[in-house]
């Protein structure tokens, strides 16, 4: 096979497997929704317009609205803030806009870790919502947005060790915190 033939074969993969530019619908812009907490604080939450995760699942069912699940969890945390939130470490998985996490930080959580799918735009969106809530967050609030706890991103064990140490006051043994 000549080098010209090899070049042609290499280029065929690009042609065959490359989606046309209009294959995916154009990304939707972010939207915003207000949520008034039971304690009176009003949060303006930015909802992402698109995510790479949505190419795997039905994109029409994602984003652009504040999930009822987040609102129900927030109400549940409010009703039980004294036992579940105040002075505790909170970890929210699949946070989306981060409503329960931000509310927990307002209601006295010691520290809050907000996580979602490991995508820069999603994490940036969660951090934007945290930053937008700074006027209602207590000065002592310790809330941060990070990527998911999957072992593929290399921070899962470190996060779990941090949470374990905070909850129990001692570092865990190596075998207890495998993700």
Image (cartoon, grey):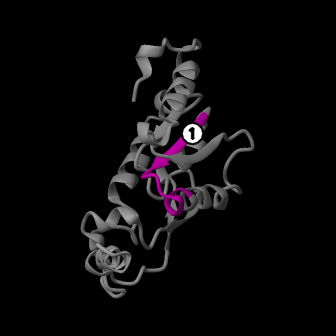
The picture places residue 122, in percent across and down from the top left corner, at: 49, 60
Q: Residue at x 42, y 36 (%)?
A: 151
The picture places residue 90, in percent across and down from the top left corner, at: 51, 35
**Mark 1, residue position:** 112
Q: Specify whether residue 16 is painted magenta.
A: no
- The one of 107 and 11 positioned closer to us in this rendering: 11
Q: Residue at x 69, y 55 (%)?
A: 134
**Split into 4 quadrants, where in the image is the C terminus?**
top left
Mark 1: few, some, or many residues within 10 Å (few <14, many ≥20)? many
Element marked by disc 1? strand
Q: Is residue 70 above or below residue 19?
A: above
Left or right side of 123 for 27: left
**Split into 4 quadrants, where in the image is the N terminus?**
bottom left
**Where are the magenta residues, as a range?**
111-123
- Tag count: 1
Q: Is residue 70 above or below residue 55?
A: above
- The one of 80 and 64 positioned closer to us in this rendering: 64
Q: Residue at x 44, y 40 (%)?
A: 77
The picture places residue 108, in percent across and down from the top left corner, at: 61, 37
Q: Residue at x 53, y 59 (%)?
A: 120
């Amino acid at each position: 096979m000549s080098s010209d033939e090899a070049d042609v074969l290499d280029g065929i993969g690009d042609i065959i497997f490359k989606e046309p530019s209009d294959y995916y619908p154009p990304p939707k812009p972010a939207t915003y929704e207000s949520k008034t907490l039971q304690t009176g604080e009003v949060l303006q939450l930015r909802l992402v317009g698109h995510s790479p995760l949505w190419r795997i699942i039905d994109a029409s069912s994602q984003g652009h609205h504040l999930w009822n699940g987040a609102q129900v969890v927030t109400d549940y945390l409010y009703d039980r803030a004294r036992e579940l939130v105040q002075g505790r470490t909170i970890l929210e998985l699949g946070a989306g806009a981060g409503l329960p996490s931000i509310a927990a930080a307002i209601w006295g959580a010691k520290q809050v870790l907000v996580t979602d799918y490991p995508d820069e735009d999603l994490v940036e969106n969660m951090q934007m919502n945290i930053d937008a809530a700074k006027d209602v967050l207590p000065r002592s609030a310790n809330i941060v947005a990070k990527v998911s706890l999957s072992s593929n991103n290399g921070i899962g064990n470190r996060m779990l060790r941090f949470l374990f140490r905070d909850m129990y006051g001692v570092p865990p043994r190596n075998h207890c915190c495998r993700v």
